[in-house]
Image: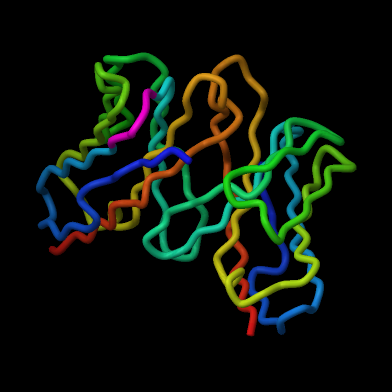
Amino acid sequence: GQQLNQSPQSMFIQEGEDVSMNCTSSSIFNTWLWYKQDPGEGPVLLIALYKAGELTSNGRLTAQFGITRKDSFLNISASIPSDVGIYFCAGSSAGTASKLTFGTGTRLQVTL
Amino acid sequence: EAQVTQNPRYLITVTGKKLTVTCSQNMNHEYMSWYRQDPGLGLRQIYYSMNVEVTDKGDVPEGYKVSRKEKRNFPLILESPSPNQTSLYFCASSLKSGRFPYEQYFGPGTRLTVT
């Protein structure tokens, strides 16, 4: 099946720092979604991207749909302790709109 | 409150003993899906359903069954569980809106251990 590579796998940052993570696909995707998962809970949708080149913000979060349609990026500005969790990218390609492929996740830990 | 619920949240069972994990949503969503989450592998789709009586295989359907007799419920059935089905399972649902893919909303998860 399709592969989504997400990096970094984990990161420690200090409170107040900006965070960047990305996701790359082995094939073209038509849509990218970014989710966050807190411990013991299900993933929660953060941002959805539907068009190549699209840049969308949700508070301190900004995500971009790469021009090549094979990658996406998520940035978190001025991180705070509640940003701790696992961030997943997910996407689908043409013809598989009803199926989401997920990345392996980026574990974010914030130190005070 | 709009939500996806799963039961049980935790289950320990033995190899070969049939079990069902229930999933229910109160948002009148047409689309529902099951995923399993394993360390280092992210979430992988098991089965999904576009509407009542319409189900299809995801990426890892072997060893699982589903049914969709009512819009709100989408149970996951393991007829003969094996240890390699030990995992964290999530149910998700969404509207079949005009935008693809559907923006799925997840339940709290069911942690299954098969010994």
Q: Is A50 placed above or below B108 here?
A: above
Residue A78, percent from left and from top = 15, 43
Residue at image location 10% in from the left, 47% down from the top: A17
In magenta stretch: residue A36 = no
Question: Magenta segment range?
Answer: A24-28
Horizontal arrangement in the rendering, residue B55 relative to residue A100 (left or right): right
Q: Is B69 placed above or below A97 here?
A: below
Horizontal arrangement in the rendering, residue A50 relative to residue A74 (left or right): right
- Screen quadrant of the C terminus of chain B: bottom right
| Residue B82: quarter of image | bottom right
User: Magenta region's main secondary structure?
Assistant: loop
Horizontal arrangement in the rendering, residue A22 relative to residue A100 (left or right): left
Q: Residue furthest right?
A: B69
- Screen quadrant of the N terminus of chain B: top right
Residue at image location 64% in from the left, 79% down from the top: B114
Q: Is B67 placed above or below B63 here?
A: above
Residue A41, percent from left and from top = 50, 59
Residue at image location 18% in from the left, 57% down from the top: A11
